[in-house]
C-alpha cells in the first residue's frame, strides 16, 4: 500500500469507519491509464514532406550532364596552438591543383603558405591591386565588396571558414582585382603567392606541366552551371550551317546505397503472456522502438556524412548571413538561389531568431495550412521545425531550403518496399527466436537514404546566430 493508503487506514481505524476506504479500493480497481509516452517523439517534418522513391536493388544512381566545374570545394586546415596549416591534400580543392598526384610537391606548397592575421574591418585586397596570390580563409568571415552603379560599396558575397579566393592568379594571365575583400570578424588567413608556385614549378616538371594543362580548362565550353555546352543557334537568317551537338554525361555518376538502422527488441515471455490487459505489452514495446528508430532515421537524413543533407549540400549553394542573425534579407537570398522552393527546414531556435528579426522590422511570418497544421512561412514557403539540425556551442546553426521530387530535379528520400516481414514501407520486424531465458527477440530494421539530384536543389544558410536579442 502507498503512504497515503496507510495513513487513511490508520485514520479509519481510529474513527471506526464502517466501509472500505477509497485509497484501499483503488488497489483492486482497474483505473484509466495512458499508453507509454516518450519525450523523444518529434513532428519529423522532413520525413513527412520528403518524396520517397522506391529503390530496387538497394542502390540509386544519379546521372547528370558532364560538368567541368571542378575544385569548387573548401580547403581543410589543422590547428596546433596558434599555428594554422593547410592540409596538403586539401590544396586539390583549388582548380589549379585538381587531380594533381604528387603529394611531396603539395606538402612543399602547403609549407610555403604564410599565416596572416587580420583584425575586424581590415582590407585583405583592394580593387586594382595586382592579383598575384591565393588567399585561404582558415577562420573568420570576409565580405566580398564591389562598386555599385553610383560608386557606392555593394556586398557581393560573404565567405567563411574553408573558402578561398584569388586562385585564378595561378593559371590565368596577370589581371588586377576587380573587387575588394574586407574582414568582418577577426580572420586567420593563409597566403600562397604566385611567385612561390612559379619558383617550385621551375624545378619540378610535373607541376609545371600540370599548371599549363590547367590553364586550358577555362577554354572548355560550358554553360553557366559548368556543364558541357550544347551547341545551338537561334535567330539566324538565310541558310547558315546548323550546328551539330550531343549531350555528354558524367562518366562516373554517384550512386547512393541504402543505409540501415537496426535494433533487437527483447520481451520476456512471461510479460508477453500475463500482462496484456488492457494493453498488449509487445505492441507497446514495438511502438516505442519504432518511434525511436524513425527519430534516428531523420537524424541520419540530416547529419550523416555520406548522404546527410547538411554534409552533401554543394558548397556553391551555401551562403552566410550578412549580420549574424537570420534576417528577411538572408532568407530572400536563400530563396533566390533555386526555383520551385518547397520548404525551409530549421531548428526551432533558428525559427524564433528569424521571428525576432521579422518583429524588429514590423514584418509577419504569415502562417500557411499544411495538412491541418498552421505552419509559419516566408514568401509563402513553409518553415518546418527540425530539432536534428545541430546548434553549436557558439549558438549558431543552419537553415535549409530545398526543392523536392524527381520530376523537379530536387531532393528525394530513398527506400525499398516489399522487404521480408515488412510492417511499414522499408521497415521490417523479424522474429528471431526465444532463448534459454525465455526471452523473445525481434530484429527491427529500417532501410533509407537521401539523394540530391542536382546541386541547386538544396541550399543552406550557415552560421546563423540564435542567441541575439534586441
Image (cartoon, helix red, strand yellow):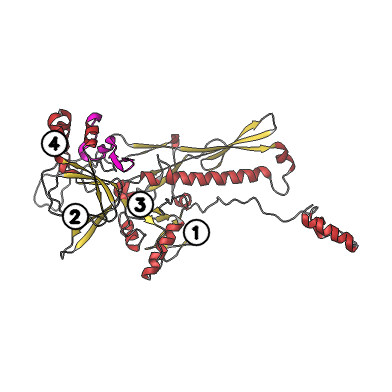
Observer-side mark, 1 or 4, equals 4
2 and 1 marks in contact (CB < 8 Å): no
- Whether residue 383 is visible here, answered yes or no, is no
Q: Where is residue 458 in the image (x, y as percent from the top left)?
A: 35, 50
- Image vertical order of residue 390 relative to residue 149, above or below: above
Q: Is residue 99 magenta?
A: yes
For mark 1, does the 10 Å Cα neighbourhood hold few (<14), some (14 to 19), or many (20 or more) residues?
few
The residue furthest left is: 238
Choose between 127 and 221: the one closer to the eye: 127
Q: How far apart are marks 3 and 1 (CA)?
A: 26 Å
Screen quadrant of the C terminus: bottom left
Of the two numbered discs 2 and 1 on the same chain, state the one appearing first in sequence: 2
Choose between 452 and 13: the one closer to the eye: 13
Name the residue beneath numbered marker 4.
Answer: 198
Name the residue beneath numbered marker 1.
Answer: 371
Magenta segment range? 76-104
Q: How far apart are marks 1 and 4 (CA)?
A: 62 Å
Of the two numbered discs 3 and 4 on the same chain, state the one appearing first in sequence: 4
For mark 4, does the 10 Å Cα neighbourhood hold few (<14), some (14 to 19), or many (20 or more) residues?
some
Secondary element at tag 1: loop
Q: Distance between the residues labelled 2 and 4?
A: 25 Å
The residue furthest front is: 81
Q: How far apart are marks 2 and 1 (CA)?
A: 48 Å
Secondary element at tag 4: helix
Picture residue at 46% right of the left edge, 53% below the top: 386
Of the two numbered discs 3 and 1 on the same chain, state the one appearing first in sequence: 1
Q: How far apart are marks 2 and 3 (CA)?
A: 25 Å
Name the residue beneath numbered marker 2.
Answer: 180
Of the two numbered discs 2 and 3 on the same chain, state the one appearing first in sequence: 2
Amino acid at each position: 500500500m502507498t503512504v497515503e493508503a496507510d495513513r487513511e487506514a490508520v485514520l479509519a481505524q481510529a474513527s471506526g469507519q464502517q466501509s472500505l476506504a477509497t485509497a484501499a479500493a483503488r488497489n483492486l480497481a482497474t483505473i484509466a491509464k495512458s499508453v507509454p509516452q516518450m519525450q523523444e517523439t518529434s513532428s519529423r517534418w522532413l520525413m513527412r514532406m520528403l518524396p520517397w522513391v522506391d529503390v530496387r536493388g538497394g542502390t540509386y544512381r544519379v546521372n547528370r550532364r558532364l560538368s567541368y566545374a571542378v575544385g569548387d570545394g573548401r580547403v581543410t586546415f589543422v590547428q596546433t596552438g596558434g599555428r594554422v596549416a593547410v592540409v596538403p591534400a586539401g590544396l586539390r580543392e583549388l582548380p589549379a591543383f585538381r587531380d594533381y598526384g604528387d603529394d611531396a610537391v603539395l606538402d612543399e606548397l602547403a609549407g610555403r603558405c604564410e599565416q596572416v592575421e587580420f583584425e575586424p574591418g581590415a582590407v585583405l585586397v583592394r580593387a586594382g591591386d595586382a592579383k598575384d596570390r591565393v588567399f585561404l580563409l582558415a577562420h573568420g568571415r570576409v565580405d566580398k565588396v564591389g562598386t555599385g552603379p553610383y560608386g557606392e560599396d555593394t556586398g557581393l558575397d560573404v565567405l567563411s571558414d574553408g573558402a578561398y579566393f584569388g586562385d585564378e592568379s595561378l593559371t590565368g594571365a596577370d589581371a588586377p582585382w576587380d573587387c575588394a575583400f574586407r574582414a568582418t570578424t577577426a580572420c586567420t588567413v593563409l597566403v600562397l603567392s604566385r611567385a612561390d608556385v612559379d619558383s617550385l614549378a621551375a624545378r619540378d616538371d610535373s607541376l609545371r606541366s600540370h599548371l599549363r594543362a590547367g590553364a586550358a580548362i577555362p577554354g572548355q565550353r560550358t554553360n553557366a552551371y559548368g556543364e558541357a555546352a550544347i551547341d545551338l543557334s537561334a535567330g539566324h537568317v538565310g541558310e547558315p550551317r546548323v550546328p551539330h551537338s550531343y549531350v555528354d554525361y558524367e562518366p562516373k555518376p554517384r550512386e547512393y546505397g541504402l543505409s540501415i538502422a537496426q535494433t533487437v527488441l527483447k520481451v520476456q515471455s512471461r510479460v508477453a503472456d500475463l500482462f496484456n490487459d488492457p494493453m498488449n505489452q509487445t505492441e507497446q514495446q514495438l511502438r516505442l522502438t519504432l518511434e525511436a528508430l524513425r527519430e534516428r532515421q531523420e537524424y541520419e537524413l540530416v547529419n550523416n556524412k555520406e548522404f546527410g543533407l547538411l554534409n552533401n549540400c554543394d558548397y556553391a549553394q551555401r551562403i552566410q548571413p550578412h549580420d549574424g542573425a537570420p534576417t528577411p534579407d538572408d532568407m530572400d537570398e536563400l530563396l533566390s538561389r533555386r526555383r520551385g522552393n518547397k520548404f525551409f527546414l530549421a531548428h526551432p531556435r533558428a525559427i524564433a531568431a528569424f521571428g525576432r528579426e521579422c518583429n524588429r522590422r514590423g514584418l509577419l511570418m504569415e502562417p500557411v495550412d499544411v495538412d491541418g497544421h498552421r505552419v509559419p512561412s516566408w514568401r509563402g514557403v513553409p518553415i518546418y521545425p527540425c530539432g536534428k539540425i545541430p546548434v553549436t556551442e557558439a549558438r549558431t546553426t543552419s537553415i535549409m531550403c530545398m526543392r523536392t521530387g524527381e520530376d523537379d530535379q530536387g531532393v528525394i528520400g530513398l527506400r525499398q518496399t516489399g522487404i521480408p516481414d515488412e510492417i511499414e514501407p522499408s521497415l521490417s520486424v523479424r522474429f528471431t527466436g526465444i532463448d534459454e531465458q525465455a526471452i523473445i527477440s525481434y530484429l527491427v530494421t529500417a532501410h533509407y537514404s537521401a539523394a540530391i539530384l542536382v546541386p541547386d536543389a538544396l541550399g543552406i544558410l550557415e552560421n546563423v546566430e540564435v542567441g541575439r536579442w534586441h
